[in-house]
Image (cartoon, rainbow, N blue to C red):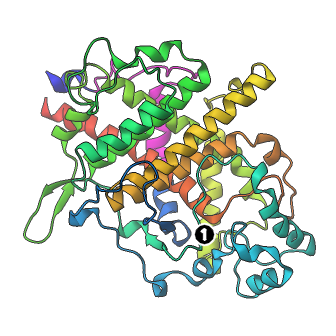
Amino acid sequence: MIGRSLLHKAALTGVLDDCFCDIESIDVFNNFKIFPLMQKLIDRDFFRYYRVNLKRPCPFWPDDSHCAIKDCQVEPCPESKIPVGIKSGNYNKYSQAANTIRDIKECEQAHELGAINSTLSNQSKEAFEDWAHHDDAQDHFCGLDDETSPDAEYVDLRLNPERYTGYKGPSAWRVWNSIYEENCFKPRSVYRPLNPLAPSRGEGFYKWLEGLCLEKRVFYRLISGLHSSINIHLCAENLLDEGWGKPIWGPNVHEFRRRFGSAETKGEGTRWLKNLYFLYLIELRALSKVAPYFERAFINLYTGNSQEDSITKELLLLIFNETKAFPMHFDESSMFAGHKMEAKRLKEEFRLHFKNISRIMDCVGCSKCRLWGTLQTQGLGTALKILFSEKEIKNLPENSPSKGFQLTRQEIVALLNAFGRLSTSIKELHNFRTLLKDQR
């Protein structure tokens, strides 16, 4: 039976490739410890509101694929609904206003330091001034959004949940095809069908991965894991019934089988799901690594409501403590560890490929899909930036911002919400296992 072969314990189980962690340990850790905490965290005001420009044109092909379905639309948040500390917190190192002491003083008076509170020393102010000049030295893996653009708007993520919108077909396939064909180090001689769910030709598409070096293999697995995670969200929040003006959303087992079933994917579904677990480990590792950045007393997730801010910071530190206690982290030191010049060239190639993928998100024709694709891509890009900034994070000054490593509010919101999405995917995977078992 399809239900028996799909996600059967023998199929999706055991140790993951390229690391020393097993799926069962991640399931228990995520579903019982991290998932409940993450749901509380991303519901806090600081993490609910994400500022994004959804009007940028596609830089790679004519932008002719806009989705007209009502569920594709994103409802921007009125300025009056944004917490005062977030609304005034547009001040960050990428704004043009960051170049003068006068602007910094104005920002402090209006509590405009975004992710950081306003009790800063003169030394800290000087560090803020230097931010803009330090950008080029940072390991950015995503194109940085211009939050000051007139087209950028605040979106309440809770009111615009990620779910199935009806956006599919050649337009959606073209986006993923461009990602896999041109940005995942795939040999041109290997054929990938435009629709990966269609019958494939010849050998399995993924045989070529076995010959790749660790870094390129990791890159592919991150993108595949992100793709799997997004597909799980669409299956878990599927339109089950239009109802009488009140649509019903919930898990669609048939859609899940279609995307991940052994028969439907010629056995590749399990591999894709394992890549989800691999991506989870990478982002989990980044959270454990970045904890010292947030543990400093002067870092305040600022909304303008001191009680709200205190609860949010306490919850975030609790999550960091859990991530640090996880015993089977991915060892990123094994990457880019060879000959110095070759490692540097490979790392830059890795970074530019990922940056290109973040730009492809501007080609997604469904606004809601673009919102969540952009957020999750930026979250992963922030995680990679963290993993490759270990030395800078170790040398963070205790009582002032660092010139060597900074995170904008947008990066922080993307990082935690993206991990929240992965945590949800693994929890939903458990739910689909149960539903499939019940069907049998």
Callout 1 secondary element: helix
Q: Which residue is mark 1?
A: 311
Residue 206 covered by magenta stretch = no
Along the horizontal axis of the image, is 306 left or right of 229?
right
Horizontal and vertical percent for residue 355?
A: 57, 45
Q: Is residue 319 visible?
A: yes
Pick the front one: 235 or 356? 356
Q: Quadrant of residue 403?
A: bottom right
Q: Amino acid at mark 1?
A: Ile
Horizontal and vertical percent for residue 274?
A: 42, 28
Instruction: Looking at this view, name the residue that lies furthest to the front.
Output: 62
Along the horizontal axis of the image, is 242 left or right of 35?
left
Horizontal and vertical percent for residue 228?
A: 37, 37
Pick the front one: 245 or 305? 245
Q: Is residue 428 visible?
A: no
- Asked if residue 304 is positioned above or below residue 365 in the image, the reply reads below
Q: How many marks?
A: 1
Q: Quadrant of residue 342?
A: top right
Q: Residue at x 86, y 48 (%)?
A: 395
- Asked if residue 427 is positioned above or below residue 317 in the image, the reply reads above
Question: Magenta segment, which residues?
Answer: 7-35
Q: Residues within 10 Å of mark 1 (few under 14, many from 20)?
A: few
- Asked if residue 293 is positioned above or below residue 195 in the image, the reply reads below
Q: Quadrant of residue 313?
A: bottom right
Along the horizontal axis of the image, is 118 left or right of 347?
right
Q: Residue at x 35, y 60 (%)?
A: 368
